[in-house]
Amino acid sequence: MKTVRLSRFNLIFIADTAYSLHQWMILTLLIKWSTPLNIGYFNYALAITAPIVMFCWLNASTILTAERAGLTNFWLFIKTRFSLLSAGVFVLLGVYYFFGEANILLLTLLVYLNKYMESFADLGYGFLQGHTAFKEVAISKIFRSLLNVSGAALVLFTTHSIQGFVIALITGNLIMLLVYDLPTIRRVGRGFDNQALDLRYRSGKELFLKAMPLGFVALLIALNANIPRLFVGHAIGTEELGYYASIAYLLVLGSLFIHSLIAVLLPNFSSDTGERQSLPELRKLTRSMLLMTIFYNASFVKYHLIFVLMMVASLFFYNSTVIQALLTGFQQFRIQTLSIFGSVVVNLVACSLLIPLYGLYGATIAYTLCAVTQIVLLLPALYRSLYPRNVALVVEQSS
């Protein structure tokens, strides 16, 4: 079993590494064939769209992975996300009116449309990983990476247009969705139904109401990542934001390990029949996941001061990501919201006080304080899930 899990992890990790490298290469292309100002505008558009997009996503891919959904569930999740993202456009326009930079409305809408395309791939990956179809996920991510990088490079080299660059990404994601992802999902999920999920989420409205706490958690997490960027853009300048975003993006490479780990191990929360494993087994799995994130992160603390501070923050954020996935596996949706909200408050206060005084260093310190707050508030919820007071010891020992 360990060998199987390790091979699955290696496969997903290689695919995620390729996928992240394609994002890093896209950032490199922007740096080479664009300007720091355009990079700043691009990241400003991301900062505005990300919280709205993440709420609309409802973290539904994690549910699909943890619960091993059927095709009926998958199409319900797709329709619900389609409706939410369509309504989110109007929210985006309102947010842009108050916080958007001048002359980047078109860029902001294009970035949102690209996230729209990515959202369907996100659901597809969650569905396939729930069925342990890791090879199919790896193929999709690798070819999506090649398509996006080649298209973005061609557009940037010939036109130097930031808008054309985003359109190339949209086109690549759409091609992969139609040519590979959807046919693969139909093939893998053919004939499989999950009666428990069918009863739990019988309509888009029911799915939205039950998963809405996860949407708020995702929104707050996106705010945590983007609050420093918005403050940097307003207080220091859009060009400085481009430099800060380039440094902060290095954290994405480390997060690949965590998401690969979660993708392989989260299906252990339920068997093929949807029954949860015993608590002692889940406790052992939890300890392994948290220890692996700590050991992985420790090797990075050897760089420049800002990068070191970000690595310290990542130590907490990586483990926080694991804890949130575990709580989702326990169907603990609402309990995450208050914890993440507390970290958002700390982030806002720290950014407003530290960035005007210390610039990019202040932004990084605020991000670190936010990370520490987040995991401190999440740990009690995980402990209560792993050690429920109302479970008799004799029952636990017999499981």
Image: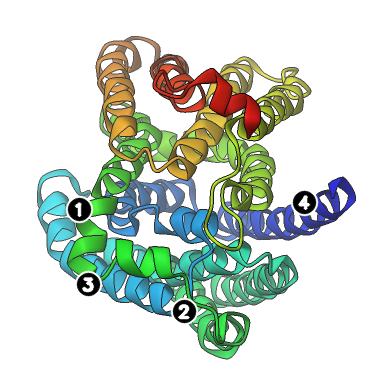
Q: CA distance from mark 4 to mark 3?
A: 33 Å
Q: Are marks 2 and 1 in contact (CB under 8 Å)?
A: no
Q: Quadrant of the C terminus?
A: top right
Q: Is residue 87 left or right of residue 10?
A: left
Q: Residues within 10 Å of mark 4 (few under 14, many from 20)?
A: many
Query: CA gap, disc 2 to disc 3?
Result: 18 Å
Q: Amino acid at mark 4?
A: Phe
Label 2: few (<14), some (14–19) or many (≥20) C-alpha neighbours in 10 Å: many
Do the residues under discs 2 and 3 have CB atoms within 8 angstroms? no
Please tell me whether mark 4 or mark 2 is closer to you in this view: 2
Pick whichever of labels 2 and 1 is earlier in the sequence: 2
Q: Residues within 10 Å of mark 3 (few under 14, many from 20)?
A: few
Taking the spot 40% from the left edge, 58% from the top edge, the residue there is: 60
Where does the image place residue 302, in percent across and percent down from the top left?
75, 17
Is residue 286 shown to the viewer in this render? Answer: no
Residue drawn where x is 41% and y is 37% of the image: 241
* Residue placed under numbered mark 4 in the picture: 9
Q: Earlier in the sequence, mark 3 or mark 1?
A: 3
- 165 and 262: which is toward the camera: 262
Q: Nearer the viewer, mark 4 or mark 1?
A: 4
Query: Do the numbered discs 4 and 1 sit on residues whose CB atoms are within 8 Å?
Result: no
Q: Real-space Cα distance between discs 2 and 1? A: 43 Å
**Numbered disc 2: secondary structure:** helix
Asked if labels 1 and 3 touch by Cβ distance under 8 angstroms, the answer is: no
Residue 71 circle label: 2
Coordinates of residue 156 in the picture (x, y in percent): 55, 70
Residue under label 3, please give it. Answer: 83
Q: Which residue is mark 1?
A: 102
Amino acid type, mark 1: Ala
Q: Residue at x 20, y 49 (%)?
A: 100
Between discs 4 and 3, the one toward the N terminus = 4
